Image (cartoon, rainbow, N blue to C red):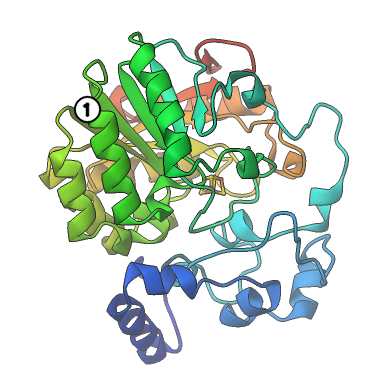
Amino acid sequence: MITRTSPSCQTENTVIRLTEAKSWQQLLSDSTLTLAELLQKLDITTDDFTASIDGDPDINPQDFPIRAPAPFIDRMGKGDINDPLLRQVLPLAKEHDITPGYTADPLHEADFNNTPGLIHKYHSRALLIVTKACAIHCRYCFRRHFPYEDNQPSRAMWTKTLDYLQQHTEINEVIYSGGDPLASSNGQLSWLSQKVAAIKHIKTLRIHTRLPVVLPQRIDTELLEILQQWPGKKVVVIHSNHVNELDASVKIAVDKLKAIGVTVLNQTVLLKGINDSATALVQLSERLFDIGVLPYYLHLLDTVSGAAHFAISDNEAKAIMGEVTSRLPGYLVPRLVREEADKTSKTPILPTF
Ligand code: SF4
């Protein structure tokens, strides 16, 4: 765990031991799902909440419910309404604001949803919506309005998706996405991976997931065996936004992945009030390097409705990245990019110095 000064160290350690004793499935199903429970776990009163932010104390959004697992909540600071981890899962009344330019499908994914469960936007890569489930609900998520109900293929429907992959020989990399693909059972991942591995032109399996960060217990023996059986290259992109997320349990998960030959990278979203300073990003990159992960992309926020309060202007982002670039060796500087709806690759945003 990230060391914190705590007046109730013994209690905190007990909580950590209990957390470690549970299986990842138990931890997932025991996740915090209400604002009241989240605040109570962090010793924040409703009065503190309403006084500290421009929020509605009764907010408990049904369209994108609260979800946070205990191992992630354990890393938040007690009594701190501005904790950068809490801010990623804390719903605010501002989510209901209508902001020009912010839409339900900012990347026009519907245009590339060629068959259920598959998005083929980039020439050589196809993305599979493995599950709609996530271990955590990030308030800035660009898929918070995604029509998962239309993208939950049964095994019979996966046949259509696999046929698509078979026919498109230009696809050499499959990306497991979601939701969070590692919220799926090992049985489902094993079945799907064997089917995809049988398609000879697919050389690389890439998994985009927050599980190694928010619920590192997910990297269990069975999952490692499934990944070990993948015949080609394996890449896991963890999604970490703040240094406080990366405690010793995350390093253990990363070590396990690297021990079986997985390349582990990180991508981050630049988020107002969470990591919008050069110092926060430098600390994140340095900690990633400590645990054996290289920073990959730093994304500007996707303009999804409900998330405008996380946005940083391009000029602010460029200035922050100018400072980050001057403070870090090149291999620790993530590429600042924007994903644009109809572009066939990410758009690089150059820093200002
Ligand atoms: S898809 Fe990823 S970013 Fe979106 S809520 Fe799930 S874990 Fe968070």
From the viewer's side, name the closer residue of 231 and 40. Answer: 231
Secondary structure beneath label 1? loop
Give the side of residue 281 with respect to residue 81, left or right.
left
Q: Circle 1: is it few (<14), some (14-19), or many (20+) Cα within 10 Å?
A: few
Give the side of residue 117 with respect to residue 27, left or right.
right
Q: Where does the image place residue 241, in percent across and percent down from the top left?
A: 48, 46
Q: Residue at x 14, y 40 (%)?
A: 229
Q: Residue at x 33, y 10 (%)?
A: 169
Give the side of residue 123 with respect to residue 100, left or right.
left
Above or below: residue 144 compared with residue 40? above
The image quarter containing residue 191 is top left
Above or below: residue 245 compared with residue 351? below
Q: Residue at x 52, y 46 (%)?
A: 179
Q: Where does the image place residue 27, in percent across and percent down from the top left?
A: 41, 72
Above or below: residue 349 compared with residue 255? above
The residue furthest front is 156
From the viewer's side, name the closer residue of 110 and 8. Answer: 110
Residue 327 appears in the picture as rendered: no
Q: Residue at x 34, y 18 (%)?
A: 166
Residue 22 appears in the picture as rendered: yes
The image quarter containing residue 40 is bottom right
Quarter of the image that includes the N terminus: bottom left
Which residue is label 1 attached to? 198
Give the side of residue 246 with respect to residue 60, left or right.
left
Q: Where does the image place residue 257, in percent across and percent down from the top left?
A: 20, 47
Q: Is mark 1 within 8 Å of ligand 1?
A: no
Q: Where does the image place residue 247, in percent across and percent down from the top left?
A: 33, 61
Q: Amino acid at mark 1?
A: Ala
